[in-house]
Image: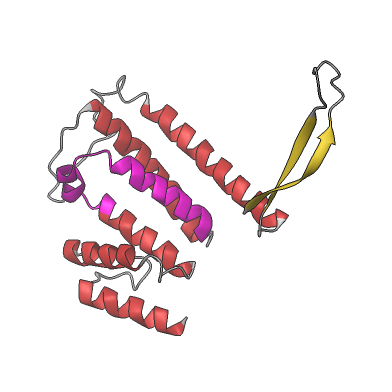
Amino acid sequence: MSCQNIGRLKSNKQNIPGGKCFLSIYVIITAESPEQVKKEDNMYMEMKETLDDATLLSEYVDELADDEEYMRLEDQSGNTIELPRAEKRALSVGLAMHSRGRAAIKKHDYSLALVLLLEADRQLSECRSQILSSVDNWAVLQLDIAWCYLCLRSLQKRACTVHAAILTAGYCGLPSEQTTGSTCSAREGRERVEQLTRRQ
């Protein structure tokens, strides 16, 4: 994208003493087609609407704080984890964005999914690391982000993210819908990603 000055227009204003007034005209030139720009605008609007809805939903966390059925967080052993309200809000928004991102993955809309998942990651990063390490949602989110980058053929730019996601998933022993549906070790995950990148 570049901004260029393409000329000047004489102003109709006559009240400038001792001279003439000219207005400069600038245009923004992009390498993207109008269709691509429209698609990105629609993607941004959908992400913003989802974020607004999730944020609105999270505002009821305070009112329903005593209702365990509304949102109860458990660790991998099934023990309930108590959270401050601010972290509960961030977690609620992050999980909603993640859920919407996974829905976009199922539709093979990886560009939209990636935008939603990155916003989910931003929201979840507001929680303490102890909380993120005690539940598997964050590790699954990293795996989903890596999968989107892989499907968008941007793996070379995000090798660190993919490697971290594989290690996280392998460390937690998480099942991956994007691989075989069985538990994926870190070594197996690395081999699968290497196979996919060689095909590209």
Return the residue found at the far front.
Answer: 18
Residue 174 appearing in the image:
no
Q: Which residues are magenta?
A: 110-138
Residue at position x 76%, y 40% in the image: 25
Q: Provide residue 62's location: percent of width, then percent of height.
A: 29, 21
Q: Is residue 101 left or right of residue 75?
A: right
* Dominant SS type (magenta): helix
In the rendered image, which quarter is residue 145 located in?
A: bottom left
Number of numbered discs overlaid on the protein picture? 0
Q: Provide residue 108's location: percent of width, then percent of height.
A: 52, 62
Residue nearer the viewer, 157 or 177: 157
Residue at position x 45%, y 55% in the image: 114
Q: Is residue 199 left or right of residue 11?
A: left
- If the image is split into quadrants, where does the N terminus sit? bottom right
Residue at position x 22%, y 66% in the image: 167
Residue nearer the viewer, 134 or 78: 134
In the rendered image, which quarter is residue 24 located in?
A: top right
Residue at position x 22%, y 62% in the image: 168
Question: Magenta span has 136?
Answer: yes
Q: Provide residue 70's location: percent of width, then percent of height.
A: 30, 31
Residue nearer the viewer, 26 or 167: 26
Residue 88 appearing in the image:
yes
Q: Provide residue 180's location: percent of width, then percent of height.
A: 34, 73
Question: Magenta span has 149?
Answer: no
